Amino acid sequence: MIFLIIIVVVIFWAIGIYNRLVNERNRVRNAFAQIDVQLTRRYDLIPNLVEAVKGYIKHERETLEAVIKARNSAVSSLDAAKADPANAAAMKKLGASEGALGSALGRLFALSEAYPDLKANQNMMQLQEELASTENKVAFARQAFNDAVLGYNNSAENFPNNFIASTFRFDLASFLEIDAEEKREAPAVSFS
């Protein structure tokens, strides 16, 4: 009788761990879905931005093409990451393509500073404001995703959960880190 009670307790304990791992994995997927929403919004704004800029910057075709190419690469990477948010290679590729897109957009905005008519264009200002707002939302969504990944990975790696996780193939998830194409250094300050 005692042996039967011990077996029942162990079974319920294992079921509890399994269900917690499923819940944590679903939180990771949900958090990535929030990133997906914000990145898709960002990608949808970029063609409008390029169209607004196109008439003003006719001589800077390679910059516009770089933005379009980086956007398309990021869309492709997002689609691959959506298929499996726990896939480390897909997350790394998404982070790299997002970094490249951010860099290309930075060059476009820097270039637009040289065109006073473009800077004063109401449509351009509105698009820049929407992109900036979306960038902030992406950052918050990415932080929430990385927090969910941390919680899931901790649950999957902690003893004795790791036995259930490895038995039922709860693979660890990867953080989403946006690669910056260019490393930013702190400015040197001198008081002499």
Image (cartoon, helix red, strand yellow):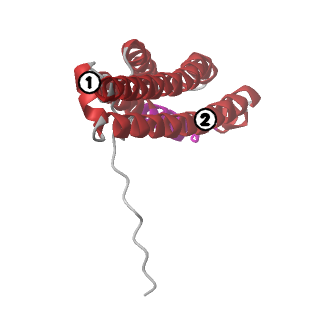
In this view of the protein, which residue sits in the foreground, 106 or 95?
95
- Place of residue 17 in the rendered image (x, y in percent of width and height, measured from the top left): 39, 29
**Disc 1 marks which amino acid?**
Ala
Please indicate, yes or no, whether residue 177 appears anywhere in the rendered image. no
In this view of the protein, which residue sits in the foreground, 16 or 125?
16
N-term mark: 1 or 2: 1
- Place of residue 160 in the rendered image (x, y in percent of width and height, measured from the top left): 28, 37
Quarter residue 89 falls in = top left
User: Residue at the location (34% across, 27% down)?
Assistant: 91
Give neighbour class at mark 1: few <14, some 14-19, many 20+ (Cα, 10 Å).
Answer: few
Q: Which residue is mark 2?
A: 137
User: Residue at the location (42% across, 65% down)?
Assistant: 187
Q: Which residue is mark 1?
A: 89
- Place of residue 155 in the rendered image (x, y in percent of width and height, measured from the top left): 37, 37
Segment tinted magenta in the rendering: 102-115
Give neighbour class at mark 2: few <14, some 14-19, many 20+ (Cα, 10 Å).
Answer: some
Locate the C terminus and report the quarter of the image it occupies: bottom left
